């Protein structure tokens, strides 16, 4: 339904004078003579007459002027606008209200997930923005330094049958070009892929009677996978948060809630890469007790497998 055009000439001379006189006490309390013989009221009436004249002229803008304004706003040729003026105004206003510029972090994420699309490439399932950071910096140990004027966007493609999706170079290049037309002039943007940190879990548990260890391991693996999934995992169900650490206490809670598990005696996080042992950390009071695995801002956990040992009746 077309938007109705506003009536700009909705104030008559008498209404303008009445409103102006009513505001005098709020502006100047000592002005108490509001009779037509007062010089100030004479000037006020003159201004009201000029205002009424201007409003009348504003309300008489020709249709061709409207079309010229719409052409400037939409950056479209006049012949491409609908013939019906009301419909043309509605279309242009709708376009203006559609988010186009990439200014805030939320703009970058919204444009990737809701606006961008390219033939032959998957849609974006998640886009996470990192302001004042160049995650494509050639020196890895300096990627997380604060860099004014830079902004990085990590992309997760929406693809089936892939546990841990990663965008290919074509997708990254397409999004880079997409942002280039929308970013602010002084901003340097970087479109990057997420980095996954693979790890496994070893745990010592007490199972309820009549539960097979292999079945419990399978069920626990499914729960860990769903919780840590980059697209639909996490507490919100919208994906595990980038850079969010993996805590032993949370893993114990997941395992303890698995059918067949009576209680968890011990649980250990085992990084796949031996050098990743540096990620493990403990509380200062008990340095020998590992409490979690640290992740960098661009990283996500990659669940591998779980190995359980049942202590039986002991």
Image: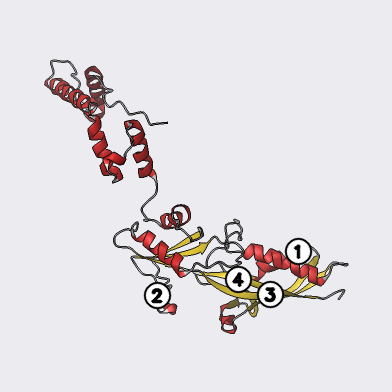
Where in the figure is residue 175, as x and y percent of width and height?
A: 42, 62
- Which comes before the other along the chain, label 4 or label 1? 1
Instruction: Determine the CA span between mark 2 and mark 3.
Output: 32 Å
Circle 3: element type: strand
Q: Which residue corresponds to the image point at 37% horizontal and 60% vertical from the top-left?
A: 179
The foreground one among 3 and 186 is 3
Circle 4: element type: strand
Quadrant of residue 218 in the image? bottom right
* Quadrant that contains the C terminus: bottom right
Where in the figure is residue 249, as x and y percent of width and height?
A: 67, 68
Q: Pointer 4: what residue?
A: 302
- Which comes before the other along the chain, label 2 or label 4? 2
**Residues packed near mark 2 inside 10 Å, few (<14), some (14 to 19) or many (20 plus):** few
Instruction: Determine the CA span between mark 2 and mark 4.
Output: 23 Å
**Residues packed near mark 3 inside 10 Å, few (<14), some (14 to 19) or many (20 plus):** some
- Which comes before the other along the chain, label 2 or label 1? 2
The foreground one among 113 and 233 is 113
**Is residue 253 shown to the viewer in this render?**
no
Q: Which residue corresponds to the image point at 79% horizontal and 66% vertical from the top-left?
A: 261
Instruction: Determine the CA span between mark 2 and mark 1.
Output: 42 Å
Quadrant of residue 233 in the image? bottom right
On screen, residue 64 above or below 236 = above
Circle 2: element type: loop
Q: Pointer 2: what residue?
A: 137
Q: How many marks?
A: 4
Q: Identify the disc placed on residue 258.
A: 1
Q: Pointer 3: what residue?
A: 201
Q: Mark 3 against mark 4, which lies toward the viewer?
A: 4
Instruction: Determine the CA span between mark 3 and mark 4.
Output: 12 Å
């Amino acid at each position: 339904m077309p938007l109705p055009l506003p009536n700009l000439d909705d104030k008559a001379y008498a209404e303008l004078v009445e409103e102006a006189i009513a505001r005098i006490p709020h502006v100047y309390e000592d002005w108490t003579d509001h009779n037509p013989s007062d010089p100030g009221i004479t000037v006020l009436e003159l201004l009201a007459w000029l205002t009424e004249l201007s409003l009348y002229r504003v309300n008489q803008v020709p249709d061709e002027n409207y079309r010229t304004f719409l052409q400037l706003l939409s950056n479209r040729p006049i012949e491409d606008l609908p013939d019906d003026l009301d419909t043309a105004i509605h279309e242009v206003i709708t376009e203006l209200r559609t988010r186009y510029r990439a200014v805030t972090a939320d703009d970058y994420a919204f444009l990737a997930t809701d606006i961008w699309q390219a033939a032959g490439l998957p849609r974006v399932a998640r886009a996470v923005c990192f302001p004042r950071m160049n995650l494509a910096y050639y020196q890895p140990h300096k990627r997380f330094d604060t860099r004014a004027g830079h902004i990085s966007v990590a992309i997760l493609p929406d693809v089936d049958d892939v546990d841990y999706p990663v965008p290919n170079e074509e997708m990254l290049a397409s999004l880079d070009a997409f942002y280039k037309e929308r970013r602010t002039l002084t901003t340097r943007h970087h479109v990057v892929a997420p980095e996954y940190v693979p790890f496994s879990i070893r745990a010592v548990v007490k199972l309820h009677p009549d539960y097979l260890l292999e079945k419990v391991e399978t069920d626990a693996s499914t729960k860990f996978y769903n919780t840590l999934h980059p697209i639909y995992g996490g507490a919100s169900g919208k994906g595990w948060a980038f850079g969010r650490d993996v805590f032993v206490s949370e893993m114990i809670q997941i395992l303890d809630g698995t059918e067949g598990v009576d209680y968890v005696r011990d649980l250990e996080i085992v990084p796949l890469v031996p050098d990743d042992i540096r990620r493990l950390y403990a509380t200062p009071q008990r340095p020998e007790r590992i409490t979690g695995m640290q992740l960098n801002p661009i990283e996500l956990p990659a669940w591998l497998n779980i190995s359980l040992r049942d202590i039986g009746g002991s």
